[in-house]
Structures are given as C-alpha cells and as structure tokens.
Amino acid sequence: MANAIELAKSYVPKLDEVYKLAALTSVLDSDGAELKEGANAGEFIIPKMSMDGLGAYDRNNGYAQGSVTMENETVKANFDRGRKFVVDVADDLETAGLAFGKLSAEFIRTMVVPEVDAFRFAAYCGADGATTVAATMIVAAMAGIRVFATGGIGGVHRGAEVTMDISADLEELARTPVAVVCAGAKSILDLGLTLEYLETKGVPVLGYRTETLPAFYTDESDFKVDYRMDSPEEIAAAVTAQRDMGYPGGMLITNPIPHQYAMPKDVIDAAINQALAEAKEQGVKGKATTPFLLARVCELTGGESLKSNIKLVLNNVALGAQIAAAMH
C-alpha cells in the first residue's frame, strides 16, 4: 500500500494550480521555490535581491560596472491556520485518486481562496473602512459573491427633478450581477421615483413574504414590489436563473423590518420631514445629504431610529445567509 504521506504530497502541485486559478490575488505570489523555513515555528526566510540600474555606456570605457546584493529577510506568519481531513488510502486508490482529489480541490476553492483573498485585500487597504452598496456590489462581483445584505439602498432623493441627486446604487444594480438584500430604499428618499428608476433600468424588485415595498424604518409603504417570494429557496432559484441567463444586472430583494422593531409611521415621517427642511436651510447637498439626514433623524427620534436600523440589518443578514446557503 502506498505511503500515505507521500501520496498526499503528490497532490500538492495540482492543488497549487487550483489555488492559482481560483484566487484573485494569486498573481501577486512570489516564487515559492526560493522560500525557506525559519529557525522558529511560523517563521520564513525570504531572499531579497537588489541591483544597480542602467548606466551610461561609451565606446572607450564600455559598460558601467554594476553590483548585485542578496539579503535574507525573516518574516513571521500572521496566522497559522489549517484543517485536517482523513481519507482512507485504499478508498482513494479505488477511485483513482478522486476521493481525496475532489475533496481537497473543493476545500481550496471554497474555503482557502476566499479567506486568503479577503486577508490580502484588507492588508492592501491598510485600514478599516466602509463602502456604499454600489462599491460593495463591485467588490462582491470581483470576488464571485452572488448575494450580500445591507441595511437599505440609496435611491432617488426627494427633489431630484431639480437636483438630479440619484444614488449610484441604482446604476450599479442595473449593470452588476449581484443580488442585494435590504429593507427597501432608505425612507428619506422618494420611494416612488426610486422604483420607477429601477424599472427603467430593468432591475427586478422582489419582496420577501410581502407584496409592498418596505420603507426601511417601517415594514410597508404605498408602493408594490414586482414579485413576492415566500422562501429563501425560491429567491435563490430566481437569482440562479438570472445568472444562468447571463443577465448583466442584479436583483433587489426587499425584506421588511420585523414588525415589533418598526418605527411608528407618523413618528418617522415627522422626523424625516424636519430633517429635510433643516438640510435645505443649511444648504446640505450631494453626498453629504444622506449622512446628515440619517444622523438628524436619529437625534429627533431619541436614538430609536438607530435601534430599528440595527435590527433590520441583522434581519437582512439572516435572510441573505439563507439565500446564499440555498444557492450551493
């Protein structure tokens, strides 16, 4: 019977190829053949070469003399992570290597690569930060993520017929194949015009167990969604069908805030109207509008709107996870 350790090693070159094809950041990898283990656990020695650049050439003296130096740098791994799987050697041989090969390749593609890419992207950025729905859609599409959850999307601002203030979220939904789970458009916006814009751009708007568009802080509005769906599996099938058709845009999945956490409509409407009036008086425009309005609404409601905001985000994340699980 083959030596189990040597058998496992024989898969390494193929698994390296699986990683290189799946990872977005594999092009940045250095030559592993030059890497050596350090004296302590988790340490590696990386050779670094430096040399002189081009120099002036003349017929009398020939080429300028150059120098090359090689130095070793010892680095410590940020994390020491792994996973153990046991596959019977005999079973693996009986399947011509498919038992371990398929398991390990799937593990590399679905578990290792996303974690490595995420860590590298975070390290490249060098700092914590936040992204809009539009930016998150772009990054998600690059990483092969088909669905994600947020609080509420941006949309057409009230008075947009004069200001032309329309969120980039809507444009991104029209051209990026990612499904977004949200509690509707933020209720500080013009919900009717937001739906009209999405319809013009060909973005389907689904309602999870609802036929009316949620209004972020409240669980209903005066507007209808395009389709009602009552299970994560049904939504997952719709997202998959859209992808299989090669449709270029995304999908908006609206999920009402749980009724017990919703704000009273008259309270939130009064706060929004006051915040809008103050924004106009103070000349708040452009990308500063939404942060100003949300902060002011929070103050006017004594922090209750923020509590609702947190609850609806958690509710959306739960649904988004169920949809993602149903897609695999």
Image (cartoon, rainbow, N blue to C red):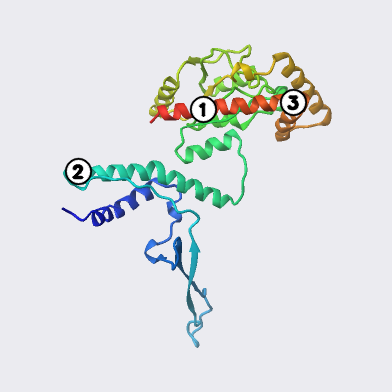
x and y, in percent, of residue 180 in the image: 53, 28
Q: Is 246 rendered above or below residue 73?
A: above
3D distance between C-alphas at marks 3 and 2: 63 Å
Please, what secondary structure does the residue beneath circle 1 have?
helix
Q: Which callout, 3 or 1, points at the residue further toward the start of the chain? A: 3
Give the residue type at disc 2: Asp
Q: Circle 1 is placed at which residue position?
A: 318
Left or right of 136? Residue 91 is left
Give the residue type at disc 1: Ala
How many residues crowd mark 1 within 10 Å: few (<14), some (14–19), many (20+)?
few
Q: Circle 2 is placed at which residue position?
A: 91
3D distance between C-alphas at marks 1 and 2: 39 Å
Please, what secondary structure does the residue beneath circle 2 have?
helix
- Splitting the image into 4 quarters, where does residue 46 fall? bottom left
Residue in the image at 73% along x and 22% along y:
159
Q: Circle 3 is placed at which residue position?
A: 297
x and y, in percent, of residue 303 in the image: 73, 27
